[in-house]
Amino acid sequence: MALPGVDEGAKRALVAELARGVQPLARNWAIAGSAAMAAVRKRMPLGAGNRFMSDPGAFRGGFDPLGLVTFASELRRVVRSELANREIDALLDSWNIDLNDTTRPTDPKRILVAENTGYLALTQGGGNCQYQAAATFLVLKAAGVRPVDVIYIFTRNGTPRHAVCVIGIQDGFPNPCEPEIARWQPSAVVADTWETDHTEPVSALAARYPAHAHRFLSFARFA
């Protein structure tokens, strides 16, 4: 299904290029996840617009005793990243896809939106956590890594907090859209491209977002 703003031929070529180095590692979730994160970071030099002088993938310091050059450069990066976010948001709105009629994260519509959101972030060169998670999902899926989920994290009162990619969440949850983090299998790994440059154990994510105060929702799943 072709979507406005998405060149399917260019998308296939880009994804094949990024997945090439990840595919041989597909069975080692931790290493494959880190490789996908590295591939995504290289294509997103603007990084996240909601991280100022702290983005591990985009912020670049240097010899600048007064800090003025570094500050100005970082300000330009953040503004450009936020503009990229807005352009992606406008395209997402133009798709007008109803995602509220299913409780299955494996629904093709959800996967389509996740994949193409990730592609747009890669072509724009930047994006906040949900875009970085989608881009990582896109690369991992193309490399044959499975199961892999785009996980959205909300507070218990419904406030959006974060988005990550998780490899290895098993099947069998009563509500597949809300797999309880306490039951994720020990071998699952978190690819939080916004936060770090390598995969982490689930315990690291749970420490940042305690389960008693947060909900973990699977937006899209490739299993």
Image (spheres, helix red, strand yellow):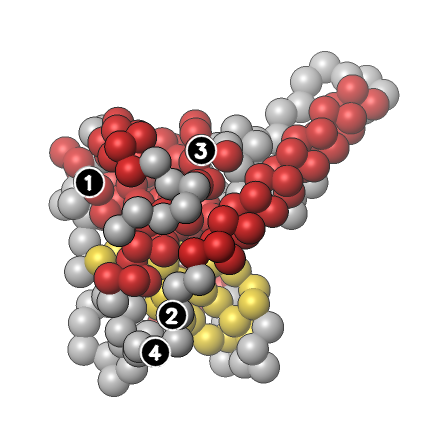
Count of labels in the image: 4
Circle 4: element type: loop
Q: In front of the other: label 1 or label 3? A: 3
Circle 3: element type: helix
The residue indicated by pointer 4 is 101
Q: In front of the other: label 2 or label 1? A: 2
**Discs 4, 2 touching: Cβ within 8 Å:** yes
Task: Tell me: 105 left or right of 73.
Answer: left
Q: Which of the 4 quarters of the picture holds residue 170? A: bottom left
> If you read the primary sequence from the N terminus, does the residue marked by circle 4 or circle 1 appear first?
4
Q: Position of residue 118 (x, y in %)?
A: 40, 45
Q: Amino acid at mark 1?
A: Ala
The residue sitting at 72% across, 24% down in the picture is 73
Determine the CA span between mark 2 and mark 1: 26 Å
Q: 16 or 189: which is nearer to us?
A: 16
Task: Tell me: 156 left or right of 139.
Answer: right
> If you read the primary sequence from the N terminus, does the residue marked by circle 1 or circle 3 appear first?
3
Q: Amino acid at mark 3?
A: Thr
Q: Amino acid at mark 4?
A: Asp
As drawn, the label of residue 123 is 3
> If you read the primary sequence from the N terminus, does the residue marked by circle 3 or circle 2 appear first?
2
Decide: is 125 above or below 173: above
Q: Position of residue 95 (x, y in %)?
A: 43, 56
Determine the CA span between mark 3 and mark 4: 29 Å
Circle 1: element type: loop
The residue indicated by pointer 2 is 99
Determine the CA span between mark 4 and mark 1: 29 Å
The residue sitting at 52% across, 29% down in the picture is 45
The residue indicated by pointer 1 is 143
Q: Which of the 4 quarters of the picture holds residue 35? A: top left
